[in-house]
């Protein structure tokens, strides 16, 4: 199927459905207002963390404190001139044009 010009390939965007989360919410609602089943799960998670289960410890920490930020290192070795030169090689339709090493576009 070919895409039509000016039309998104995914007009609805990312699916809003989250079947696993929906199923969990349904089970929590079915557990009643005192949430005994949910409390049992939380208790097991805490017991596992206390016994040294690193996955349980990480889950508790992530849920209580939030996931830690991850550092991202990047280096950019480009000057304005080199970026300008690169941009001049596009033909206006997001396609690279090969002008050779010394040729310039015919504008």
Image: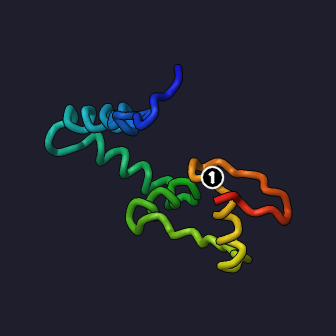
Q: Seen from this angle, which residue lies furthest left?
A: 33
Q: Residue at x 70, y 59 (%)?
A: 105
In the image, residue 85 lies at what x, y percent?
Answer: 70, 69
Quadrant for the C terminus in the image: bottom right
Out of 93 and 59, give the one closest to the viewer: 93
Secondary structure at badge 1 equals loop
Out of 35 and 103, give the one closest to the viewer: 103
Q: Is residue 48 left or right of residue 37?
A: right
- Crowdedness near tag 1: few (<14), some (14–19) or many (≥20) residues, C-alpha within 10 Å: few
Q: Seen from this angle, which residue lies furthest front?
A: 106
Out of 44 and 64, give the one closest to the viewer: 64
In the image, residue 47 lies at what x, y percent?
Answer: 45, 55
Q: Seen from this angle, which residue lies furthest right?
A: 101
Q: Residue at x 20, y 32 (%)?
A: 30
Figure disc tally: 1
| Snapshot quadrant of residue 20 | top left
Q: Is residue 3 left or right of residue 65?
A: right
Q: Is residue 66 left or right of residue 17?
A: right
Out of 86 and 74, give the one closest to the viewer: 86
The image's colour scheme reads rainbow
Q: Residue at x 52, y 70 (%)?
A: 69
In the image, residue 2 lies at what x, y percent?
Answer: 53, 23
Residue named by callout 1: 91
Q: Seen from this angle, which residue lies furthest top?
A: 1
- 83 in relation to 22, above or below: below
In the image, residue 18 lies at what x, y percent?
Answer: 36, 36
Q: Residue at x 42, y 65 (%)?
A: 66
């Amino acid at each position: 199927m070919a895409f039509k010009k000016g039309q998104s390939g995914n007009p609805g965007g990312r699916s809003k459905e989250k079947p696993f989360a929906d199923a969990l919410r349904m089970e929590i609602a079915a557990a009643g207002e005192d949430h005994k089943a949910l409390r049992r799960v939380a208790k097991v998670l805490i017991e596992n963390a206390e016994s040294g289960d690193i996955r349980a410890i990480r889950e508790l920490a992530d849920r209580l404190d939030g996931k830690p930020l991850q550092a991202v290192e990047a280096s950019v070795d480009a000057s304005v001139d080199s970026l300008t030169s690169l941009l001049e090689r596009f033909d206006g339709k997001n396609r690279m044009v090969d002008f050779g090493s010394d040729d310039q576009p015919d504008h």
